[in-house]
Image (spheres, grey):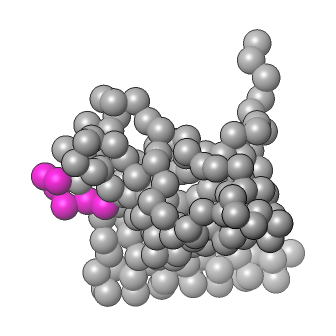
Amino acid sequence: MPAKEDRKIIAENRAARHEYFVLETYEAGIELFGTEVKSIRGGKVNLKDSYAAVDKRGELYVYGMHVSPYEYGNIYNKDPLRPKKLLLHRREILKLFGQVSREGLTLIPLSLYFSGSRVKVQLGLCKGKKLYDKRESDAKRDAARDMERRMKGAD
């Protein structure tokens, strides 16, 4: 029986769930350098305003993900905003590329976490929300909170 995978969440893109409908999620590996991993272990990463796209060679990259330079990394530090390659199977990349180009969807990094000793990214295939959709989801969330409060008060 396989051992249960240990997931330690490093960073989450909370704004993504507010701005987009998440249709599907994918787990991808990410190509990082040593100083970037050390910085990520310290929690020095920001997923806000990041997105993923397929380049001309058919490789998937995440853009806008800010990994702060490692404090003790000196000359080995990389550019904090450099595009980072995501590791997925070729057919998954082609499937995602087709959906993004035809249907007007976007690939958004939802969270960054350790799976064992490896850094993984949870990608969401997302569709943008309109303003009225955001209001509707806020109203649903507030109604659920009110019901929860009233249920606690009734006990």
**Relative vertical location of residue 5 with respect to residue 101 in this rendering, above or below:** above
Q: Position of residue 137 (x, y in %)?
A: 44, 77
137 w.r.t. 114: above or below: below
Kindly indicate the quadrant of the structure image that contains residue 126: bottom left
Residue 22 vertical placement versus 86 (above, below): below
Q: Is residue 129 left or right of residue 148?
A: left
Outermost residue, right side: 155
- Residue 143 in which image quadrant: bottom right
Q: Of residues 111 and 29, which is closer to you in this image?
A: 29
> Residue 130 in the image: x percent, y percent?
28, 81
**Residue at 76%, 12% in the rendered image:** 1
Q: Quadrant of the C terminus?
A: bottom right
Of residues 51 and 7, the one nearer the viewer is: 51
Residue that lies at the very extreme toward the top in this rendered image: 1
In the shown orientation, is residue 54 left or right of residue 112?
A: left
Whether residue 40 is visible here, answered yes or no, is no
Q: Report the span colored magenta.
A: 101-106
Does 116 lie within the magenta span? no
Residue under the point 44% across and 36% down = 88
